[in-house]
Amino acid sequence: MRAKLILLISLVTLPSWADTAADPSGLWNTFDDKGNIESTVEVRVQEGKLYANILSLHNAPEDNPICTECKGDLYGKPVIGMQIINGLTLKNDIWQKGSVFDPKTGDTYKSKVWLENGELFVRGYVGFVYQTKMWQRPLENSAKIGT
């Protein structure tokens, strides 16, 4: 009887543990193709969907450049504050069925995002062609916004 009770409690709490294991909320550093830090991004879950906004740029020629490659309403807007992950939903520990936006090119891609070994993998794709970027949590000393 006691073993059945422990098993039942484990099964009831397992789904909630799995959801938190896939929760990438918090600050993340993004990197260019050479491994240099590009930006710090805040990732959050709102109403069951994943979103991310640029908080700061690193090694940029300007403090807060405007998006000259963006189209429509985003053209000429500041890059800092832009939402770059839009409305992904969680399924089997992978955030998917949403989009990722690249302010360098002004393009939006279908995307998937997942956590693996403490790193966040962000994949943008068109058809069968994709690119995956790895994001890392900032070190405590370098987590200052705007550095």
Image: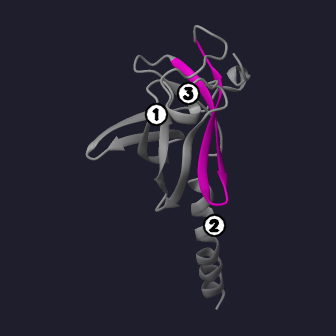
* Pointer 2 local density, CA inside 10 Å: few below 14, some 14–19, many at least 20: few
Which residue is labeled 2 in the image?
16
Q: Amino acid at mark 3?
A: Tyr
Q: Is residue 119 magenta?
A: no
Residue 134 is tagged as 1
- Asked if residue 69 is positioned above or below residue 136 in the image, the reply reads above
* Residue tagged 3: 75
Tell me the chief SS of the magenta region.
strand
Residue 26: % across, % down = 67, 40
Distance in Å between CA atoms under marks 3 and 1: 27 Å
User: Which secondary structure, mark 3?
Assistant: loop
User: Is residue 23 something that shows in the picture?
Assistant: no
Q: Residue at x 55, y 32 (%)?
A: 136
Picture disc at residue 112: none
Label 3 close to label 1 by CB (< 8 Å): no
Query: Can residue 63 be seen from the camera position used here?
Result: yes
Q: CA distance from mark 3 to mark 2?
A: 41 Å
Q: Which residues are magenta?
A: 37-59
Query: At 74% across and 22% down in the image, what residue appears?
Result: 144
Front: mark 2 or 1: 1
**Kind of residue indicated by mark 2:** Ser
Tell me which residue sits at (65%, 85%) in the image: 5
Mark 3 or 1, which is nearer the eye? 3
- Determine the residue positioned at 60% across, 87% down: 4
Quarter of the figure with residue 143: top right
Residue 83 location (% of width, % of height)? 60, 38
Q: Residue furthest left?
A: 128
Where's the C terminus, which quadrant?
top right
Give x and y (percent) for residue 61.
58, 7
Label 3: how many Cα within 10 Å (few below 14, some 14–19, many 20+): some
Q: Earlier in the sequence, mark 3 or mark 1?
A: 3
